[in-house]
Image (cartoon, rainbow, N blue to C red):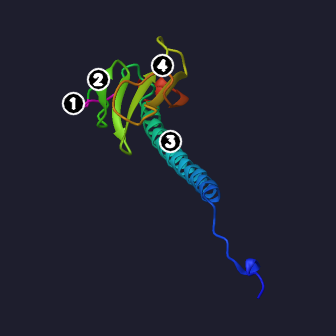
Amino acid sequence: MGDNHGNRTRGMTLLEVLVATVIVCVAAVGVLSYEYHAAKQIRMASAKIEAVRLGNLVLEDWKANGGSAIYAVGASSNPSPLDMDMGFLRTDNGVYRVTAGDIPMQITLKRPSGFPNPVPIKVTVQWRKDFCEGQIFSNDPAVVLNTYARPEQTGG
């Protein structure tokens, strides 16, 4: 009888198994990394959408107020720089805090001193890169909106 060497099935060597494992691991890490970055980009896009909405709300309200240097109507309906009567927390002169879409945001209002006509007004909405509470730095993401207001529209 002849040799049966041609019919013998050959198994995988340890080296082949290790190479296949490494290839599968690299692919899995790549997929997980992509999912992580995609989720992060979705969260950043959501934050930008909320920031633009907030910025437009404040900018249009301020513009309707004639770009008043003392922007904000408090609970007493008297102009007050202390609050905006929109549920925002005042932290400093022209700086407010609010949480939108579970993201803590800071809103900064600016206008030049004096009485130019029309009045340039600027609203900056900013949030932390990690989307958490805490101090916001100049290199954190921001949305900046600018427009002009006419003080004579409202006596502002």
Helix, strand or loop at mark 3:
helix
Helix, strand or loop at mark 2:
loop
Work out whether mark 1 precedes mark 4 in sequence or the reverse, and give the earlier one. 1
Q: Which mark is residue 68?
A: none
Amino acid type of the residue tagged 1 in the rendering: Ser
How many angstroms separate mark 1 from mark 4 (CA)? 24 Å
Q: Which residue is mark 1?
A: 76
In the foreground, 18 or 106: 18
How many angstroms separate mark 3 from mark 1 (CA)? 37 Å
How many angstroms separate mark 2 from mark 3 (CA)? 33 Å
Seen at 28% across and 23% down, the residue is: 82
User: In the rendered structure, which segment of residues is drawn in magenta?
Assistant: 72-77
Helix, strand or loop at mark 4:
loop
Can you give x and y, in whole percent of width and height, for residue 35 in the image? 53, 51
Q: Main secondary structure of the magenta part?
A: loop
Q: Which residue is mark 3?
A: 44
Residue contact at pointers 1 and 2, CB within 8 angstroms: yes
Helix, strand or loop at mark 1:
loop
Amino acid type of the residue tagged 4 in the rendering: Arg
For residue 1, side relative to residue 64 (left or right): right
Q: Which residue is mark 4?
A: 111
Can you give x and y, in whole percent of width and height, for residue 80 in the image? 29, 23
Residue 28, compared with residue 56, is above or below; it is below
